[in-house]
Image (cartoon, helix red, strand yellow):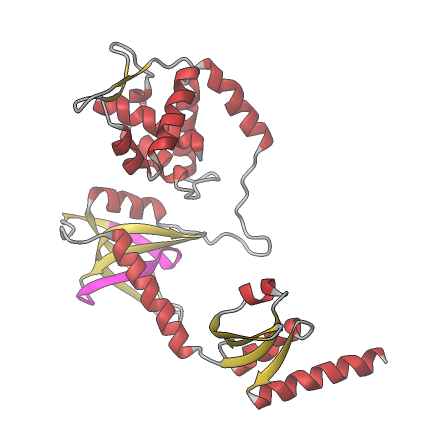
Amino acid sequence: MRLHRLIAILLLIESRGRMKAKDLAYALETSVRSIYRDIDVLAEAGIPIVTISGPSGGIQLMEGYTVNLKQLNGDEVIHLYLTGMGVYAGGQTETGLKLKNALLKLEKTLPPSYQTDIQKAKARFYFDDAPWWTQRAAIPSLEALRAAVWRSQKLRIAYTKVSGACSVRIVYPYGLVVKTADWYLEAYCAFAGEIRTFKCERITTAEPIGEPFEIPPDFSLEEHWNRQAADFKQGCRVREYYPVKIKLRMTNKTVKERLEVIGSRQAGEYFLLTVNLYSYERACRDIVDLLGHIEVIEPEMLRVFAKEKVTGLVNMYA
């Protein structure tokens, strides 16, 4: 999303006055070389950017010049940041309309050389991340959740579990996480007395109760989410473990890349692999697609199943 990075550079150096390339690179999670390439692009577009060397130097706009990005209000900048992260904000939702408004303002203030590219991008690229066979899950309380996270405001939420049981609880919303198309709220739950993860589509109502709170200084949303994700994956591995030994030609590496390999050794022209197929039922389902590429060695019950499938196919086409 280079356009978002170019906009972010302009926002940063206009708001802060002067920044070093390494600080821009750190803020935008890219390399210093990429920052300098972006600066060259902005300069070629006619934006007077000055680079000053030395300990107190950095990158800044020419004195007296403005790109008018300050006319964007804070909420619009947030929406730009979210869409730059790939966060879905389309449709006729409040979030989507605010984003469109912010982008329209930007289009009007960017240099003329950008206008052609923006119009061309609109005509040539269309991003549709809606699933083919299902509707995108509705998140009725998304705006209230986002506002509460941003303002550090306590919420009273009604939450429906997978089982259908509904509960009302007071939460301190620490942050929102988007995992592919799903939104999650990381919040301290007063009822449970600990930080919990709530799937946003199951939050049917979210009501601010007018009480601010402070996030613990040692809390990191990214670290907490990654730790939770790792624990979840490990739990799944423990619950869903069904090791299968197979034989695979070394020339067929693409099949190996599709499998969760937990052990591997070479034997002549073959890989002897131990792979996790999670359960006998799932192994029976998945193994059918692999029969032309692998030989099942163990467990014997799965090898017999594979042999019966192959025999059945041979008889069908005999």
Q: Residue at x 53, y 48 (%)?
A: 130
Q: Position of residue 301 (x, y in %)?
A: 59, 89
206 versus 19 height, above or below: below
Q: Quadrant of the C terminus?
A: bottom right
Is 174 in front, or is 4? 4
141 versus 15 height, above or below: below
Q: Position of residue 254 (x, y in %)?
A: 59, 62
Q: Residue furthest right?
A: 318
Q: Residue at x 60, y 68 (%)?
A: 250
Horizontal side, residue 175 vs residue 284: left or right: left
Horizontal side, residue 134 vs residue 84: left or right: right
208 versus 160 height, above or below: above
Is 283 in front, or is 158? 283
The verdict on residue 310 being magenta is no
Q: Main secondary structure of the magenta part?
A: strand
31 versus 120 height, above or below: below
